[in-house]
Amino acid sequence: MSTQLTTPVNRQSAEALSRSKGEPDWLGALRAKGAELAETLEWPKPQKTRIDRWNLNAIGVYKPQTTVSSTDELPEAVRNLSGEAPAGLIVQRNSGVVLKQLSAELQAKGVLFTDLETASREHADLVQKHLNTVVAQDENKLTALHSAVWSGGVFIYVPKNVEVELPLQALFFSDDVEASFSRHVLIIADSHSKVTYVENVVTDYSDTAEAQSLVQQAVVEVIVKPGAQVRFAAVHHMAENVIDLTTRRALIENDGRMEWVIGDLHDGHTLSDTQSLLKGNGSTSDAKVISIGKNKQQMNLTTGAVHFGRSSESGMVTRAVMKDQATAIINGITKIEKGATKANGQQTEKVLMLSPKARGDANPILLIDEDDVKAGHAASVGQVNPEQVYYLMSRGISKQEAERLIIHGFLAPVVSEIPIKAVREQLQQLLERKLEV
Amino acid sequence: MATQFVIDGLKAAIENKEILKGINLEIKGGEVHAIMGPNGTGKSTLASALMGHPKYEVTSGAVTLDGEDVLDMATDERARAGLFLAMQYPSEIAGVTNSDFLRSAINARREEGKEISLIKFIRQMESKMKELEMNPEFAHRYLNEGFSGGEKKRNEILQMLLLEPKIVVLDEIDSGLDIDALKIVAAGVNAMRSEDRGFLIITHYQRLLGYIKPDFVHVMMQGRIVKSGGPELAERLESEGYDWVKEELGIVDETVGQV
Ligand SMILES: Nc1ncnc2c1ncn2[C@@H]1O[C@H](COP(=O)(O)OP(=O)(O)OP(=O)(O)O)[C@@H](O)[C@H]1O
Ligand SMILES: [Mg+2]
């Protein structure tokens, strides 16, 4: 029996690659362990989506990248995506980070913003202590495999009491379908610090490359120390041949706050799982997700909040528009553990179907082991309301424009909440593009 | 050419149930027609059929606006041709702000590249809102969402003022309005009265017609206009109800489409 059949890496290859990149021994050992675990663990089994039918092993091969000195040297299609990034910018091309910038002001304040490979050498104490603590290696085959193969990535550390006003930005793009494109993001916000991080995940292939599958694996771990606040915004819009497997998770300590804004506008199969672990008393989280599915795209989008802390609060909103024959399974999981008294978890999932062949499932799940709590959910799957279209048309607005207004109106409660204007506008443009017939 | 709106033998059905049984009515620019009639006699159906609501099927008859075949047009084309219906139950549309909606409606009447400038639009909208004593905040609220009954009606009139239609159908614009709001809305309508604009006002109450003097009053029963007259007809209906009309015409059940 060959392990190659089920897993694209093994202990030896993971260790060898780590050594060739000059990574510290502890990381090499971690990667080796991940590769080994991947051989025995199972793929995650998200509700109602057979991801085992996706080409999950097409993770590409590690290819070193040449660094650039400014965004001007990037391909035209991705050059302007981050706009001005005065605070800091990291650009990853395929397997490796090619550009890193951090303002002198933030450097002086002790903020660390670099690729995770560099951080594992230069800030080994911090990285080793926190890596894989929020998303464990041995959860499933995906997390194990990822821990073995990730490259590039982002590391953010914000020291105690430091507030980073402007967003730190990252751009991840793939323009080589044979190269691996799997990043790991580790964010540590120390006590009473504050930071906003925005990432853009895109592809720029020639038409011929689009025939080949590539898995984009991403794991995001966020550690929110007491009283800290982290805002995380991500926009994914890769080509159809890319399979997006993204796991985001935050661990939130006392009175910490985590905000997620996710634009799942990817054109290919998507497994997107965004969770907040509300460990601390008084910790809060908020997740807003929008998605548009088209063609034969399959999407499984989960938001989750697990309450451990007393008086912890979570809010989750997902809105998805499904076109053509796209399928979306949307799960909201609010879990309140025993002892999390006065916790409050609220969630809403709404799907708007634009085609009779599209499929949408909204699954609100409340798992509650404590009496003294509040929890609520609302879920709906529906079509564009013909009465509304008629009303708008009765004012002279064309049918097409009426539907456009209604669809944008459906997504507006999430879009309008996006904290950063540039991201909001970019998202708006992407929405327009993906909604066009 | 003065506005001329002609409804000729209009029959319409919903779910294969005939509701309108042949409506004849001619409205010229400058005229105000009122339609009164008991509940369930087809008044709103007439309004919906004129506007082209997808649920109502016109089975025979003709409607023309300045000689153009209205029934041949889609709802949005009817609106752009100059027809306006203030609905009895306006839709709520979450996520679409009132001002975005209004601007889209205005721009729908203009050629591409000749859209109204934002400044000009805001100035127009704000001045009309002021006329209607609407809180400016309503511009930024989602369209009709959470509006009170009276606020929705005022918002319908705001649209009428901004869109300047040729033929205005008001379906129970007075329902849900308090006394002051009724006066404001009536003033808004009166300000729009002109030689090239005609009105069809559906109402249950003489009170509105006290503020907006109609030239003609029609009574609708059983999906037909069964009696027409001047403003005095509305006054008599207000004081005596419909029994005398039914008696005069030998009508027992005035409703339509009931099984
Ligand atoms: N969508 C519909 N589905 C089924 N029946 C309908 C529908 N719309 C109207 N009807 C029926 O058609 C008849 C006429 O209704 P319409 O709304 O035109 O009355 P109306 O004169 O406007 O009454 P009101 O004074 O109460 O507003 C009623 O019996 C009504 O139930
Ligand atoms: Mg009615």
Image: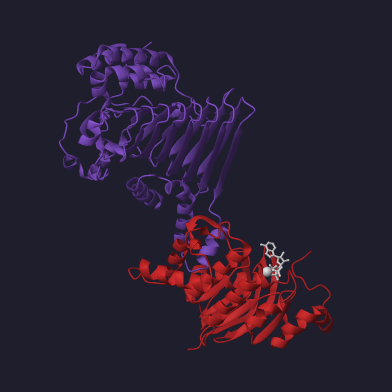
Chain colours: A purple, B red
Apparent side of residue A299 relative to residue A168 in the rendered image (left or right): right
In this rendering, the answer to whether A255 lies above or below A418 is above
In this rendering, the answer to whether A400 lies above or below A351 is below
Q: Residue at x 39, y 72 (%)?
A: B110
Q: How many marks can you see?
A: 0
Q: Residue at x 40, y 18 (%)?
A: A137
Viewer-proximal residue, A373 or A99? A373
Location of residue A204 (image quadrant): top left
Pinpoint residue A252: horizontal percent, then vertical percent: 44, 27
Residue situated furthest front in the rendering:
A161
Apparent side of residue B17 relative to residue A144 in the rendered image (left or right): right
Q: Is residue A103 visible?
A: no
Apparent side of residue B53 relative to residue B164 in the rendered image (left or right): right
Q: Quadrant of ligand 2?
A: bottom right
Q: Residue at x 73, y 85 (%)?
A: B233
Viewer-proximal residue, B12 or B239? B239
Viewer-proximal residue, A347 or A419? A419
Pinpoint residue A107: horizontal percent, then vertical percent: 23, 31
Pinpoint residue B235: horizontal percent, then vertical percent: 74, 84
Q: Is residue A118 visible?
A: yes
In this rendering, the answer to whether A163 lies above or below A435 is above
Pinpoint residue B23: horizontal percent, then vertical percent: 67, 79
Question: From the image, which quarter does the N terminus of chain A lie in?
Answer: top left
Q: Residue at x 77, y 71 (%)?
A: B255
In this rendering, the answer to whether A24 lies above or below A223 is above
